[in-house]
Amino acid sequence: MGQSLTDTGKAKAVAPRKKREKIEIMEVKPREEWFKRSRDQFGRTVWFLRVEMTGLRPRRFGPFPTKHKGLLFLDHLLNQLGDGFSEATGDLDRYQARRRCFGMRAGHYPVVEDELCS
């Protein structure tokens, strides 16, 4: 009864919502010092992402329209780095110090060494 004569039988087509990409790889919550807010030439707020890795200079990526887009990029970057970590771990024995086997010493318990303490 509430429909007009021109609107009979035609429902408005609703565009399906886009699925929002999810952050999957990151292990820690983002911190404020990772982000630097700035303005582009049109006065819009944009975000830059600061990334530090041991042995490398800090790097700045961006500009991103939102922090979420920057975090999606960081998640992708971590995914790519994870592949490199697994490849490098395969060669770890080549660079790592050999472990010494202590065995039993004249009926005494074997010496237990903590790798993190040495």
Image (cartoon, rainbow, N blue to C red):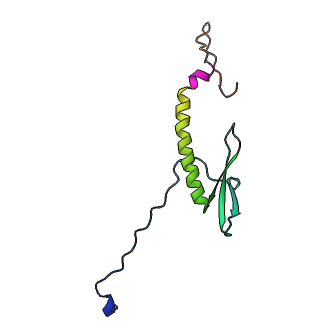
Q: Nearer the viewer, residue 50 or 29?
A: 50
When the figure is inspected, residue 76 is found, relative to residue 42, above or below; the finding is above
The main secondary structure of the magenta stretch is helix
Please give the range of residues in magenta.
Answer: 92-97
Q: Quadrant of residue 71?
A: bottom right
Q: How many marks?
A: 0
- Residue at the farthest top position: 106
Q: Quadrant of the N terminus?
A: bottom left
- The x and y percentages for residue 57 are 71, 42
Residue 25 rendering spot, x and y as whole percentages:
53, 47
| Residue 58 percent coordinates (x, y) | 70, 45
Q: Nearer the viewer, residue 116 or 47?
A: 47
Q: Is residue 59 left or right of residue 12?
A: right
**Residue 61 belongs to magenta span:** no
Q: Is residue 21 left or right of residue 61?
A: left
> Residue at the spot x=57%, y=52% of the render?
73
Q: Where is 46 relative to 23, above or below?
A: below
Q: Is residue 28 left or right of residue 6?
A: right
